[in-house]
Amino acid sequence: MPDYINYINGDWEKASKSKIPLNDAGFLLGDGLFETMRFDNRKLFRPDKHLERMHASLNVIHIHLESSDSEILSLLANIIQKNELESGLLRLMVTRGNVEGPPWQYIGPASIYINIRPFSPEPVLPVKVVYYCDKEYPIIRYTPAIKSLNYIGNMLAKKDAEKDDAFEPVFYNGDGFITECAIRNIFFIKDKQLLTPSIKLGVLPGVMRDTIISIAKEINLTIKETNISIDSINEMDEAFISSTGIGLLPCFWDGWQSDFTITSKLKKHLDRFINITI
């Protein structure tokens, strides 16, 4: 992999030379959050939505960020320019800043880190998912949901999904309601209705999720953000997962299959929307 240039809280450093301060709360305590943002032809995809969600999340965990949106957007544009990468993903991380401790006294201010990478190759479609109860994993759910730097439960589930020969795990909660994937959102189609778990369950309101819901409305699909029982999945007509990085991918699970007619239509509209947006 090329030695990409990262932004390390005020410094530009190549990945092989990057040094993370060991007293930073994000890396010492997992105290921070992140946004994964896509760019195509060097243009960011819906950065306003990402920054809006980032600020809402920072308010939830009481982190004050001194940098303005224009300053952050300038950093994001600079990292794309410095790396001469046409399309890919940026990971913007905000932490509470440096700490002294124990007992972990914050001395701040909030820190910003940005790294960059190209898109991963699109997998063979449809992709397989596997369903896990989230009580089996150390997952913290905030309401409203945030992209916390604490992803240990999600990553453990990803590892287990790999062992089960699946592309992505899908969680359901203790009440038997489907929530989200380890790093993605999930949708179902039943009787020409688009169903997706309610954010009241602590589901992350993904930017791509929001985009897909908007597109579905434009093509006259009925959308329901609702509680979806794990016991109902085999009654679904279609299913797909979504994220900033992958867009939309049709999915299946053992014992269930689909022709993905409406999913394919949605994917075409989404791909066209991304191309128009850039």
Image (cartoon, rainbow, N blue to C red):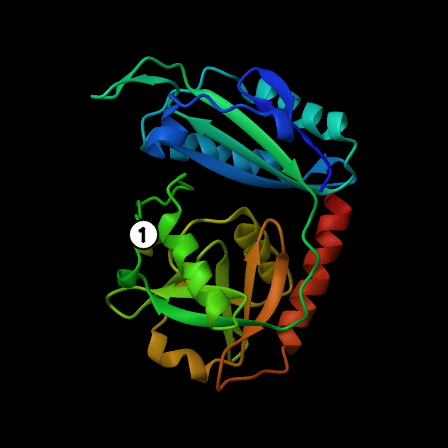
Residue 225, relative to residue 66: is it above or below? below
Res. 117 in view = yes
Name the residue at 72% across, 30% down. 80
Image coordinates for residue 66, horizontal then vertical, percent = 46, 15
- The quarter in which the C terminus is drawn is top right
**Would residue 18 appear left or right of 82 to someone viewing this image?**
left
Image coordinates for residue 4, horizontal then vertical, percent = 69, 32
Res. 53 in view = no
**Would residue 119 appear left or right of 106 to someone viewing this image?**
right
* Residue at disc 1, secondary structure: loop
- The quarter in which the N terminus is drawn is top right
Image coordinates for residue 61, horizontal then vertical, percent = 32, 31
| Residue 250, quarter of picture | bottom right
Q: Which residue is mark 1?
A: 139
Image coordinates for residue 118, horizontal then vertical, percent = 70, 44
| Residue most extreme to the front | 16
Q: Amino acid at mark 1?
A: Ile
| Residue 23, quarter of picture | top left
Residue 170, relative to residue 106: is it above or below? below
| Residue 89, quarter of picture | top right
Name the residue at 58% across, 57% down. 212
> Mark 1 Cα within 10 Å, few/some/many (few <14, many 20+)?
some
